[in-house]
Amino acid sequence: MKRIITTFLALTAAFCAVIQAQTAQETKAWTGECYAVRQQTYTPSFEIDGSDAEIHNIILMIGDGMGSGAVNAAMYANGGSLTMTNLRTMGYVRTQSANNTTTDSAASGTAYATGVKTNNGYIGVAPDLSELENLPEKLSELGYACGILSTDDLHGATPAAFFAHQGARGEYDAIWEDLPESQLTFASAGTISRFNSLGFRVRDAIEARFKVISAPDDTAAIRKSKRLLYLPETVATKDRGDYLPNTTRMAIEYLSARSEKGFFLMVEGARIDKQEHANDCSGMIWETLDFDKAVEEAIRFAEKDGHTLVIISADHETGAVTLTQTTPDDGFVRTVFASKGHSPMMVPLFAYGPRSREFSGVQENSDVSNKIYSLLK
Ligand SMILES: [Zn+2]
């Protein structure tokens, strides 16, 4: 009898251990369920897609943290389509940095901006801290007008990689101090209050080179200006309205009018990443759908212009996002976040316009930058 009881107790303990292990594994994932309000998407004609037409302009669009999970979640929540998933040319991007298989936005932004992999935390400098030439520096020499636009602060890692050279991404004031020496013709990111908090010497240096505005309503002053810095009151999720798509259109118009040769524009949807860090399903979808509205602006311009290539990708994946269920007709998705940080997953790339096929297949984030430069050279 004693042996039977002992065996029974041992089996019960083993069973409980298995249950506990399963529960422990399940609690690593944070589930989010959400519905989204459906928005229109745009499908271009594809006449210019993959053609050998001359390229005058390139628009690089970076969804910060926008991996396959975010794209899928936003697509199904939007009834099954996005402007970016309506495109036909697709590739994958490997994002690892020089010193880590999981990159941060500083190292990946630098790879996209300069064509060189660097260490996490570094902005526009190599692992040995030497300065790297970014696309605006290389392309302005060839006569292109260059611009950046982001829903982050201007000192955020991705926009900063396109104008600053700093060994630490947190050196915000030093990043702002690099702006007057940059080769940007147009820049927009948050916020005017951050600009006003800078020392007056830095502000004077910036204002000596840029017309600084906090609202896009003074069209006469904007038209007269040679270089424009548009710093809105807010870039926060949902508070900023249609800032990202509207400013994408504004940047395209502004840059088109300032160079005969053509332009390069980087547009960042910065807050997809921030929502994923918080494992906020509906925030992630809202931000990805907002980014897709900016994609639509770029694709509509490319379609009309015929000499513009649009590249849409991400600097890294965030949240290890996956989907377990969806009802696209209802805009319902159930997502699982397996992480609160970045992941080493490859990220999707979509392209539209002349020579778009050069971006298909698997490539490094630094390759994307080098291809952009050789196409415009
Ligand atoms: Zn992040």
Image (cartoon, helix red, strand yellow):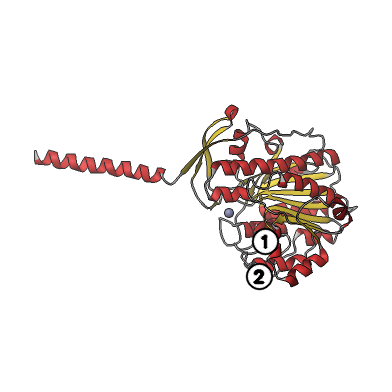
Q: Amino acid at mark 1?
A: His
The quarter of the rendered structure image containing the N terminus is top left
Count neighbours of disc 1 (C-alpha within 10 A) and say few if under 14, some if 14 to 19, many if 20 or more: many
Residue 126 in view of the camera = no
Q: Residue at x 63, y 60 (%)?
A: 106
| Residue 155 image label | 1
| Inter-mark Cα distance, 1 to 2 | 19 Å
Q: How many marks?
A: 2
Residue 182, picture quadrant: bottom right
User: Would the CB of label 1 be found within 8 Å of ligand 1?
Assistant: no
Q: Residue at x 61, y 61 (%)?
A: 98
Q: Position of residue 374 (x, y in %)?
A: 79, 54
Q: Quadrant of ligand 1?
A: bottom right
The quarter of the rendered structure image containing the C terminus is bottom right
Residue that sits furthest to the right in the current view: 260
Residue position marked by numbered label 2 in the rendering: 129
Q: Nearer the viewer, residue 74 or 362?
A: 74
Residue that sits furthest to the bottom in the current view: 201
Q: Secondary structure at mark 2?
A: loop
Count neighbours of disc 2 (C-alpha within 10 A) and say few if under 14, some if 14 to 19, many if 20 or more: some
Q: Position of residue 131 (x, y in %)?
A: 71, 68
